[in-house]
Image (cartoon, rainbow, N blue to C red):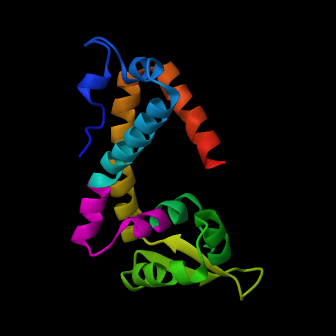
Amino acid sequence: MVDPISPTEMPDDNATAADGAALMPREAALCLAIEQFYFGYRAFTAQPDRILAQRGLGRVHHRILYFVGRNPRISVNALLGMLSVSKQALNAPLRQLLELQLVAMGTAGHDKRVRQLSLTPSGAQLEALLTGTQMEQLQAVFEQAGASAEAGWHQVMCRLGG
């Protein structure tokens, strides 16, 4: 297993990961970025994954809870587009969240064929717990890294996500 940032890759003890990456050949720096992204994402999802696993849920359930929570009364079709998944991929986890009464489904006032999703109080509580752990983690990392690093991170993520 590769360490997220191996000390042997760093020029000296006072160097940052960015400084070390700048001194590497481009391919090695890109591989390091991929590894850091992987290990960072693993750390970012670890605590929510543990909380979800206790309920028999997974990461896809968190994604649904998060985006329904940020977009109350979102239509199922809009959620499909936002998550960029097929109806088939969304069906089972959404049905599970509905059965657990974490998400509620209603009809739109303007068109009874349109199904709208909202979090129930228990769904909102779970979503706040899951996302709260990630917000705390990002807050701590951004405070350590500084405002310019945070701004750079936002730029990279915006470009990566399209």
Residue 58 placement, left or right of 158: left
Q: Is residue 61 magenta?
A: yes
Residue at the spot 38% in from the left edge and 34% down from the top edge? 139
Magenta-tinted stretch: 47-64
Q: Position of residue 150 (x, y in %)?
A: 49, 28
Work out which residue is located at the far right of the displayed protein and give it: 110
Question: Residue 99's image quarter?
Answer: bottom left
> Is residue 19 among what the camera can see?
yes
* Residue 9 % position (x, y): 31, 24
On screen, residue 139 above or below 82: above
Return the x and y of residue 76 as percentages of the image width and height: 62, 77
Q: Position of residue 38 (x, y in %)?
A: 38, 47
Figure disc tally:
0
Lateral position of residue 98 relative to residue 113, left or right: left
Camera-side residue: 53 or 16?
16
Whether the magenta-drawn stretch holds residue 140 is answered as no
On screen, residue 136 above or below 132: above
**Which residue is painted at 31% across and 20% down in the image?**
10
Residue at 24%, 24% (x, y): give it. Answer: 7
Q: Measuring 32% from the left and 73% from the top, which residue is drawn there? A: 57
Q: Main secondary structure of the magenta part?
A: helix
The foreground one among 75 and 7 is 7
Q: Is residue 73 visible?
A: no
Quarter of the image where one finds residue 71:
bottom right
Q: Nearer the viewer, residue 89 or 131?
A: 89
Residue placed furthest toward the bottom:
113
